[in-house]
Amino acid sequence: MSVQAYVLVQTEVGATVGVRSAIAAIPGVISAEDVTGPYDIIVRAEAPGIDELGREVLSAIQQVGGITRTLTCPVVHL
């Protein structure tokens, strides 16, 4: 079973479009959408396991220039 997470992303002023495009190109990113509110982008990401999600997807997102903060929310099935 794969692991999915939502990643809430804050960007520098004026950087949202470029950041979203860069994030959308990362393998494991299912979607990246612009939103309003305290965060600028919501990303849905997927990987085979939690470790891969962190090492491969989340670390790649955090390296994108123009990001000021991220918050990762793993999806749980209750």
Image (cartoon, helix red, strand yellow):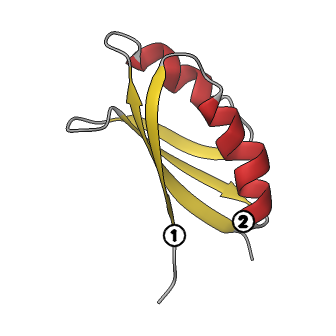
- The quadrant in which residue 11 appears is top left
Residue behind mark 1: 75
List x then y, in percent, for residue 7.
49, 48
Residue 17 appears left or right of 52: left
Q: Is residue 8 above or below residue 16?
A: below
Residue that appears at 70% across and 44% down:
57
- Farthest residue to the top: give it: 14
Secondary structure type for disc 2 = helix
Residue behind mark 2: 50
Amino acid beneath label 1: Val
Residue 28 seen anywhere in this rendered image of the structure: no
Secondary structure type for disc 1 = loop
Residue 54 appears left or right of 41: right
Quarter of the image with the N terminus in it:
bottom right
Task: Kindly identify which numbered label has been placed on residue 10.
Answer: none
Q: Earlier in the sequence, mark 2 or mark 1?
A: 2
Residue 75 seen anywhere in this rendered image of the structure: yes
